[in-house]
Structure formats: C-alpha cells, structure tokens
Amino acid sequence: MADRRFKDREGRSWDVRVRSRADWLYEPVDDNPGPARTGAAPGYETDPFELSVEELQQLLDDAKAPQSRQKKSPFLD
C-alpha cells in the first residue's frame, strides 16, 4: 500500500503511512516544521486513498505528537 500525501487546512503537507491495522503515522514533508504524529486508523477503512481530505484532517487533529519523557535528575534534591 502506498503512502498518501495531503495538505491540511493550514496548507502544510503530510505523508500518511499505514503502520498497522490500528495505527497510522502522519509525517511532515516539504516545508512543514511540525513533528510526526501517530494516530488511530479509522475502523471503517484501511487505505488512506479512500478517505476524503476532511476525514484525513480529522484524523490528523486527533493524532498526537510523541511525548518526550522527562526524567528526574538524580542530582537534584
């Protein structure tokens, strides 16, 4: 299955990659400075090419950027 590229409502480009039946990866491309996001795949469709831009936008809005884990410093009291 190929990756799909689409532009969000702000005009930024994203590649949609199917990682599994449950997860899709949204990667910024071209001049998009945003972080990559992982989101749940829609339960009714397995191919991003079958979704409208509005549906992809909603999935992107629901997707979350990976959280950096802040470790507590062992040198602080």
Image (spheres, rainbow, N blue to C red):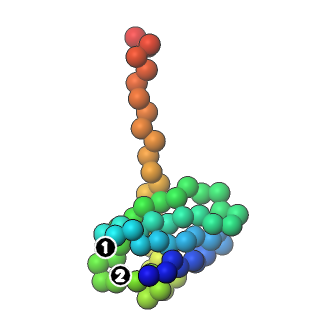
Position of residue 9 relative to residue 67, above or below, is: below
Tell me residue 33's x, y (percent): 65, 57
Tell me residue 21's x, y (percent): 31, 73
Left/right placement of residue 31 relative to residue 44 reads right
Residue 46, disc:
2
Residue extending furthest top? Answer: 77
Tell me residue 27's x, y (percent): 54, 64
Q: Amino acid at mark 2?
A: Thr
Left/right placement of residue 26 relative to residue 34 reads left
Q: Are marks 2 and 1 in contact (CB under 8 Å)?
A: yes
Residue 21, disc:
1
Circle 1 sits in a helix, a strand or a loop, which is it?
loop
Q: Which residue is rendered at x = 70% and y = 63% of the image?
A: 31
The tag earlier along the polypeptide, 2 or 1, is 1
Q: Amino acid at mark 1?
A: Arg
Rendered-image quadrant of the C terminus: top left
- The mark tally for this picture is 2
Q: Which residue is rendered at x = 34% and y = 76% of the image?
A: 42
Position of residue 64 relative to residue 42, above or below, is: above
The reply to whether residue 10 is visible in this rendering is no
Report, in whole angstroms, how far the alpha carbon at label 2 lies from the one at label 1.
Answer: 7 Å
Q: Which residue is rendered at x = 47% and y = 60% of the image?
A: 37
Q: State the image quarter where residue 69 is shown.
A: top left
Of 28 and 8, the residue lying toward us: 28
